[in-house]
Image (cartoon, rainbow, N blue to C red):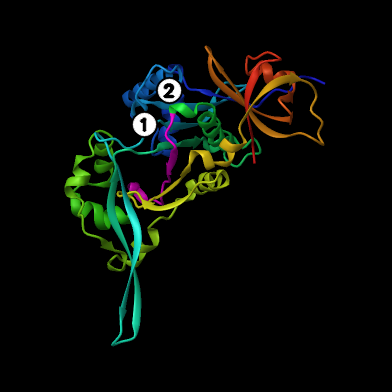
Amino acid sequence: MAPEKSAFLIRQAALRDHRPLLRLARELDSINLPTDSAELREALERSERSFAGRIRERAHTVYIFCAEDARSHRLAGASMIIGKHGTPEAPHYYLAMDTEERYSHTLRRMFRHTFLRLRHSMDGPTEIGGLIVTAAMRGRPEQVGKQLSWVRFLYLARHRARFETQVLAEMLPQFGPDYRNAFWDHYGREVTGLSFREADRLSTHDKEFIRALFPDAPLYTFLLPEDVRRSLGEVGERSRGAVRLLEQAGMKFLNHLDPFDAGPYYGAQVSELGPVKDYRALVAVIGEPSPEKSRAFLVARDDRRGFRAVRTEAVAEDSRIIVNAGVLSALSAREGQRVGVVPLP
């Protein structure tokens, strides 16, 4: 039997990926991956230093992964990890969603009111984001999005000391034409005088205006128009697949919303994530995995040449994993070396 050829190599991004990643970022306009050329180049430089362990402060680290087609060498998608989101210099701001009960003995009526209140954290969690799959590869059997999502959990498990104990993900809500957002147009624009684009752009460099201009008083949701109320915590059409993957990994809606677009925040303790609990470092053994016993795994290796991972059907038993020779070739690994392994759902 011929060696298995993995369809995609999931690897750390490099400066040479600048142009294709810029096209990908602009295709989806994701939350974390910069759409500005100079900003993306700076992020890629930081990513290379982060993977190499040359940045001490977690708040300055970023890890960008990309999926490279093994045949054409074109990039099919990307994802990322931000070492720490929320510091004294740049707090993590969010709207906490809560309820209060009111009861009138005279009227014998009780009301439960939902309200939002601006909160912040100066010792924030690790954040995962930037999940992008090119339009041509969405919904295909290769499931590139799942690989790019799961590789972040594998890396978190493999390098626990580099990250916080909690992990967060911000999900894109539904946007209208011209990047209009119902919540921002009704609330954020009124309290800041900025368009959504202006506020979003400014916040990447300076968050002072959020604390200075957003009211401290609770915002009762019954005061909002019905369409705005419905949009709170709503996930956009293109983000629903990513949410399902996060939920499969064990992340849950935190009842926290982004203060700009009211998109939901999902989170969990890193130690409670399914892929992290399932992670193992196993000795790679070349063989032909039995179809009856094999299952899908993400298998990874990182060394001086960088981080890379591939999806494969394999058999994990005791302290070893039986893989096709083509898998080790794709990973530039040898039989007998240890590889990081996470089962794919």
Mark 1 = which residue? 34
Assess whether residue 173 is covered by the magenta stretch. yes
Image location (x, y in percent) of residue 156 = 50, 31
User: What residue occupies the far bottom of the structure in this picture?
Assistant: 106
Quarter of the figure with residue 33: top left
Residue in the foreground of this view, choosing between 315 and 30:
315
The 10 Å Cα crowd at callout 2, few under 14, some 14 to 19, many 20 or more, is few
Q: CA distance from mark 1 to mark 2?
A: 12 Å
- The amino acid type, in three-letter code, at marker 2 is Arg
Image location (x, y in percent) of residue 225 = 31, 66
The residue at 46%/25% (across/down) is 20
Image location (x, y in percent) of residue 271 = 52, 39
Q: Earlier in the sequence, mark 1 or mark 2?
A: 2
Assess whether residue 78 is covered by the magenta stretch. no
- The amino acid type, in three-letter code, at marker 1 is Pro
Q: Is residue 153 left or right of residue 172?
A: right
- Span colored in magenta: 163-179
Q: Which mark is residue 224?
A: none
Q: Is residue 318 left or right of residue 144?
A: right
Q: Quadrant of the C terminus?
A: top right
